[in-house]
Amino acid sequence: MLRLIPIPLIRFHTCDFWVATLATRFKHGGKVLSCGNGGSHCDAMHFAEELTGRFRDHRAALPAIVISDPSHLSCVANDYGYEHVFSRYVEALGQPGDVLFGLSTSGNSDTIIRAVDAARERGMHVILLTGKDGGKLAGRADVEIRVPHFGYADRIQEIHIKVIHTIILMVEQLVASKN
C-alpha cells in the first residue's frame, strides 16, 4: 500500500511506518540497499553510513549498503549502460524482505526506476525520497516522501537530508528502546 506524504503536510511523527519497516526488516535479518545520483548519491551514502556506524547514540551496527563501488559502477556502465548501475547490484544482493532506499530529486532517474523494478522482482520493500511531482517514480514505492519544490534540486536535497536524519534518529531510538 502506497503511503505518500507531501512535505507541506508532513509531521515527522508520520515517518513512524518508515521506521517500523526498517526496524522489522533489521529484526528479521534484512538489509537496506541505498542509491541516488549526484548529490542524492551522497545522501544515499550518508544514510548507509549512519546506519552502519552511528548517528548520535552507541548501538549495534545496522546492515545498510550504498551502491557506490567504483569498479561495479564503471563495469556495469560500460557493459550494460549507466541506467543499469543500481539495478544490477540489486539483482546481485537484494533478497525478499530487504529494503531499497532510493533518492531522486526529479523522480525521473532511469537508474532509480530500474532499481525499483529489480527490487520489486525480488520481493523487496521500496522507500523513496523524491521531489517535484514525483515524476515517473510517483506511486511506485511502499513509502514515498516527496518534496513538491519545482525550483532548484539543492532545495529538495536540503529537505531530503533533514528527513534522513529524522529517520535515523527514530531508528536509533527504537533500537535503543528494544535493548
Image (tube, rainbow, N blue to C red):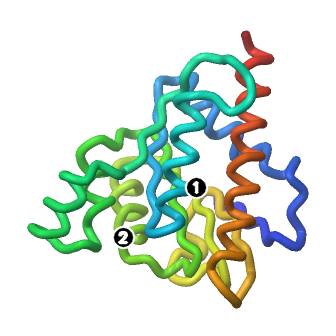
For the question of whether residue 54 can be seen, the reply is yes
Foreground residue, 85 or 128? 85
The residue to which callout 1 is attached is 127
Q: Secondary structure at mark 1?
A: strand
Give the image quarter of residue 176.
top right
Q: Residues within 10 Å of mark 2 (few under 14, many from 20)?
A: many
| Left or right position of 174 against 65 | right
Check disc 2 and report its element: helix, strand or loop.
helix
Mark 1: amino acid: Ile
Task: Please name the residue that numbered disc 2 is placed on.
Answer: 111
Left of 26 or right of it: where is 16? right
* Distance from the alpha carbon under mark 1 to that under mark 2: 15 Å
| Front-most of residues 118 and 13 | 13
Q: Residue at x 78, y 49 (%)?
A: 15
Q: Position of residue 156 (x, y in %)?
A: 69, 74
Q: Residue furthest bottom?
A: 151
Give the residue at x 41% y 71%: 113
Above or below: residue 118 compared with residue 45: below
- Farthest residue in the top direction? 179
At label 1, counting other C-alpha atoms closer than 10 Å, the crowd grade (few under 14, some 14-19, many 20 or more) is many
User: What is the x, y in percent for residue 147?
Assistant: 73, 74
Residue located 46% across and 69% down the image: 38
